[in-house]
Image: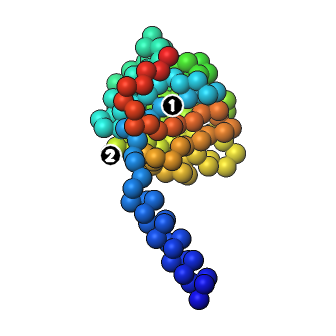
Amino acid sequence: MLIGVALILLGGLLIFSIATRVKGEIAYVKVSNQAVMQISLKDGSYVANNPSNVIVLTEKPEIDGFDLTTSSEVILLEFGKTIVVYQNLFYVRGALGVVEIQYKENKIRVSKEKSPYNICSRQGYSDVAPIVCLPNFITIEFSNDTDVIIG
């Protein structure tokens, strides 16, 4: 009887915590624990820590190890610096290769990455729980504070 009451209380606490969780408004993309960009979860707009390191493409690139290729060029990504943007996709270079981050419907996910078990790409979309790509030294953290400036 006591176990049943404890399970009911824990279930209620879980439902309460899920119902009252605060969703993030901004996703911070970090490489080696240094913020390289922030993505608004309201509309997918982004602000790079160093705008001169951003390359905006008009066609979807293919990931080729540590680089990206398009029909007309090969783009060399510098670890923790270069950011490539194509529509709602963001590319940063991790320790093991290029990581593709996708924005969709107020959430973020890692859609492609190279790592032994592909754990961060299997985490799915998030706007609350951090996404951690340990082998690539990339993390995505969420915040509600829209006044935070990275730099």
Vertical relation: 22 (above or below) 95: below
At 30% from the left edge and 38% from the top edge, which residue is drawn? 42
Name the residue carrying label 2: 105
Q: Is residue 88 visible?
A: no
Say which quarter of the image contains residue 86.
top left
The residue identified by callout 1 is 29
Decide: is 75 above or below 20: above
The answer to whether residue 85 is left or right of residue 10 is: left
Q: Give residue 40's position: percent from left, percent from top.
A: 36, 33
Q: Secondary structure at mark 2?
A: loop
Q: Label 2 sits on what residue type? A: Glu
Using the image, determine if residue 2 lies above or below residue 68: below
Count residues near mark 2 (Cα–Cα under 10 Å), then give few for <14, some for 14-19, many for 20+. few
CB within 8 Å, label 1 to label 2: no
Of residue 60 and residue 10, the one placed in the foreground of this image is 10
Question: Residue 59's image quarter?
Answer: top left
Q: Quadrant of the N terminus?
A: bottom right
Q: Nearer the viewer, residue 150 or 116?
A: 150
Report the residue that reaches farthest toward the left: 43
